[in-house]
Amino acid sequence: MGRWEPDTRGRLERAAIELYLEQGFDQTTVAQITHRAGLTTRTFFRHFADKRDVLFAGRRELSERVAKTIAAAPPAWSAARAGASGLNIAAAALQLRREEAKDRRALIRSTPELRERELLGYAEMAETVAEALTDRGLEQRAARVTATALLAAFQVAFEYWGDHPDRELPQLVNETLDELKSIAGSDF
Amino acid sequence: MGRWEPDTRGRLERAAIELYLEQGFDQTTVAQITHRAGLTTRTFFRHFADKRDVLFAGRRELSERVAKTIAAAPPAWSAARAGASGLNIAAAALQLRREEAKDRRALIRSTPELRERELLGYAEMAETVAEALTDRGLEQRAARVTATALLAAFQVAFEYWGDHPDRELPQLVNETLDELKSIAGSDF
DNA sequence: CCCGTGATGACACTGAATGTCATCCAGCTC
DNA sequence: GAGCTGGATGACATTCAGTGTCATCACGGG
């Protein structure tokens, strides 16, 4: 794998995040990143689709874990409960990387481009969850509503977590899911 | 206002959408757009923030209408109901432009960049709704969960509308909102 | 020891987006 | 009606993201 200096991708990732934090995302050029990593510009784009992609690496893997969790949920569980169990896995995984998440959040909040990409991540996750729910037999549109609403709660919990770093994300997710329940229980 | 040929912005908008539909978004350059509109590239970026912005013009105006509707809802209504009334206004407004919406949707579905921008629009709308709900006295996190969940239902309805153009969007929004209710009513 | 594979370097190129200054037109003033 | 002013456009230069292409290098297998 590593023929020259090892861990090319890792070096690029670290250099990028360092520079994004030091100077801001917009002020950082890909040339600066690759220079710090001792590589060329072209190599950066062989490892990442674009400048933003560096910050959203583990997304697909996380989606897969969520999907598997939902598929493994007891058939007796409601769709919402099965989906929620998937989100709890995701929350637990993210809780383990809270320091990393803090940096990421600071960048995302200050850069609309990054916010866009983050939202795309949520949407893809919602699609994954919806698919997992249809596989359990739920009708398609209901699956999409369920999945998107669950991700909505997750999203709010995640943002709240940013403002309250002492709290535990899985716990916060459960709280927002409860809020979601009580909302729908109201009279509208 | 219009000193040379009138309606500069409108000409750019029409030229852009025509070309996006004819050739695809990625294959269209800003130079092609401005050439068709009889203007220069620089002028394009004086009217639109970027290539994508052309397709998301009326967003802010719509957000304001939604916010006003929520603010004007009877104080006795639940937050969810007040928010839903705002979304109904938005749905009615979009229903009037269903032909235009059809083109937009075709483009957005075939171009991830545009999908990102659309999601940002939903997120901004959710923020607007959340703010309107906190103004009604709802606690902040609950307002965010409510707003984001409502937009989730709206989003699913909007996408469903794309596949079922004969249906009426306001009606579809009500249906997905009902689905949202029954989800939260289940046992999770 | 050679050869193939996969990753990197080097180079050229397109196109988005921005900054800057000159230019033009409309309406207003006197 | 001559001149002024302000907002909008044209013209030009520039930076930088992202892509295509080909040469080059290191490693593992034969």
Image (spheres, coloured by chain):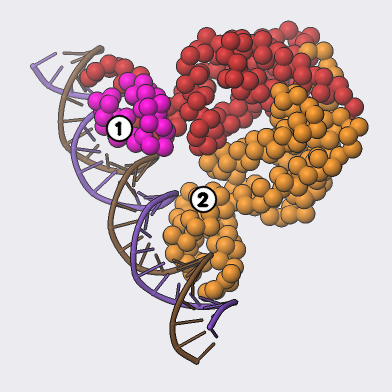
Chain colours: A red, B orange, C purple, D brown
Subunit of label 1: A
Residue at left offset 83%, top offset 16%: B186
Where disc 1 sits, the SS reads helix
Subunit of label 2: B
User: What residue does disc 2 label?
Assistant: B49
Where disc 2 sits, the SS reads loop
Residue B87: quarter of image: top right
Residue B24 screen position, x and y as percent: 52, 51
Residue at left offset 58%, top offset 57%: B17
Residue C22 screen position, x and y as percent: 34, 70
Crowding near the residue tagged with mark 2, few <14, some 14–19, many ≥20 C-alpha atoms within 10 Å: few
Instruction: Tell me if residue A86 can be seen.
Output: no
The amino acid pointed to by label 2 is Ala
Q: Nearest the camera: B61 or A9? A: B61
User: What residue does disc 1 label?
Assistant: A32
Instruction: Specify whether residue A86 is painted magenta.
Output: no
Q: What type of secondary structure mainly makes up the magenta span?
A: helix
Establish if B181 lies above or below B129: above
Residue B174: quarter of image: top right
Labels 1 and 2 within one chain: no
Is B77 displayed left or right of B122 in the figure? right
Residue B89 screen position, x and y as percent: 80, 45
Q: How many marks?
A: 2
- Magenta span of residues: A11-40
Crowding near the residue tagged with mark 1, few <14, some 14–19, many ≥20 C-alpha atoms within 10 Å: some
Establish if B64 lies above or below A58: below
Instruction: Specify whether residue A22 is painted magenta.
Output: yes
Q: Nearest the camera: C14 or A167? A: A167
Is B129 displayed left or right of C25 in the figure? right
The CA distance from mark 1 to mark 2 is: 26 Å
Residue at left offset 60%, top offset 38%: B120
Tell me whether the residue at label 1 lies in contact with that at label 2, contact meaning CB atoms closer than 8 angstroms: no
